[in-house]
Image: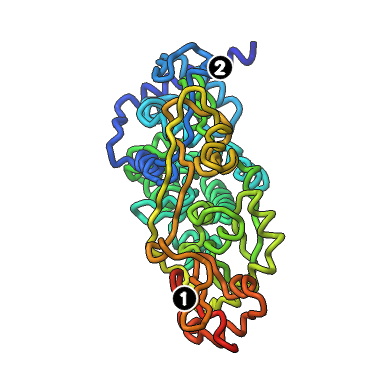
Amino acid sequence: MRSVLLLSLLATCATDLLAQTESMVVRLSPDDPVMARLDDLAALPWIQRSAFTTDTAAHNVHGFAAEQVPAWSERDVQHRLAVLDERTPFNLIYNKPVQAYIDLYAVRKREMTSRMLGLAELYFPLFEEHLDRYGIPLEMKYLAVVESALNPAARSRAGAVGLWQFMLPTGKLYGLKADSYVDERHDVYKSTDAACRYLKYLHHLYGNWELALAAYNCGPGNVNKAIRRSGGVKDYWKIYDHLPRETRGYVPAFIAVNYIFSHHADYNLYPIAPAYCAYEVDTVQVCYPLDLAAVAVLTGGTVQELRELNPTFKLGIVPDVDQPVSIYLPKDAAGVFVSNEETMRYSYQAAGAAATPAQAATPIATEVAEQKHTVRSGESLGSIAHKYGTSVSELKRLNGMRNDMIHPGQKLVVKRTNAPASERTATAEPRSDNGALYHVVQPGDTLWSIAQRYQGVSVEDLRRLNAAVEREGLKPGSRLTVRVPNG
């Protein structure tokens, strides 16, 4: 009975607040910051080319067709928010601004909401662990959804970066380093820890989470001014009109995300799985220079994959560091890396790493050739793999597939070639020229790996015969002298 009375009271309070906010501007403009983050997520190459799909109709608990968006009354939404509000220290009220953002996530940006529901599987376990450690309500994990749409590479027009959208000065204040090669605002662990410490400070400053959220977005100075202009009252909705425009939608968007992530199935929304879930990504600690392209060659991954998992390293290079840093790898790749770490460390140094990080990261012009197959009725991944002389696991890797399900008409990549244009006709085989033996340098080659290919050849031999390597480094497509007559 007490619970029923409490829900009734909360609904009445929400109705009163709704009446107070009827006059608020709730039409979301195209340049709304929250909408901009969703558009940025949609523009990512790994989202645009993703092979993942979701069959919402197959799992629909309400019987709606996949393209249908169920419509719920204000009373339904109010009641659901009242139930959520009972479980959290946040004030999850219902009003017109909140409804505007519910519509944004549930109707206008449905696909991106499904993407974020999937990405939550990767990031939320980490967020919750840190929030719990600092004694912050676990619902604060939804702040990163509003801030960055769970895109660790996100960058706002104002220069805020990463999952938690730190500006450079604030990031440095909370220990996040940034220079030409590394930007720790992109680091998932370090930025999450910094965000928790900053939020803890803001809550101590204002005594309630809504004002802490507002201050996180626009800074304590702007919130303090809004409080003064409102007569000193510390209530988000009473200082609403005095906040910067982009911050007015901030708390309503946060409330809407709480609601949508709890009731996505009621809107026929289901997660689109990300390439990697939290349990499929591992970290390794390194304290020496490292090229992610070389790691990709060693572990059988792709450079794009590793750079997307490690946006902290702006040029795809781990520079020489004073303290160990984390790099993120698919779990299987992490095992391969650890088993071959000494080889990786030595080969990078043997290759000169004579090139500076900037030189090592200079992009190489590439041409990507893909062979595709259109799935016919009755075909399986096994039959397609047999036809093209490959394996089911390779097909799944090339197409980012998490299961064996395919459907007629679907286009599958069955072979991909990614090599510098200069070596499209070159091979890694040695070549003879006037009696000398040469090796055509391939992407990922190092002096150490090349020496291993030729009996009796050492790294010192290669350096002695190829003095330019010390100055210029290894360049894919160039010829490296391996042995000279009687040499």
Query: Tag 2's secondary structure?
Result: helix
Residue at the spot 52% in from the left edge and 37% down from the top edge:
387
Labels 1, 2: front one: 1
- Amino acid type, residue under disc 2 in the picture: Leu
334 with respect to 80 (left or right): right
209 with respect to 374 (left or right): right
- Amino acid type, residue under disc 1 in the picture: Arg
Residue at the spot 52% in from the left edge and 54% down from the top edge:
302
Residue 188: image location, x then y, percent: 56, 52
Going from N to C along the chain, the mark reached first, 1 or 2, is: 2
Residue at the spot 48% in from the left edge and 23% down from the top edge:
55
Image mark count: 2
Q: Decide if residue 231 is in sight here.
A: no
State how far apart marks 1 and 2 are (Cα). 76 Å
Residue 294: image location, x then y, percent: 55, 64
Q: Quadrant of the C terminus?
A: bottom right
Query: Tag 1's secondary structure?
Result: strand
Q: Which residue is mark 2?
A: 7
The quadrant where residue 169 appears: bottom left
Marks 1 and 2 in Cβ contact (< 8 Å): no
Q: Which residue is mark 1?
A: 479
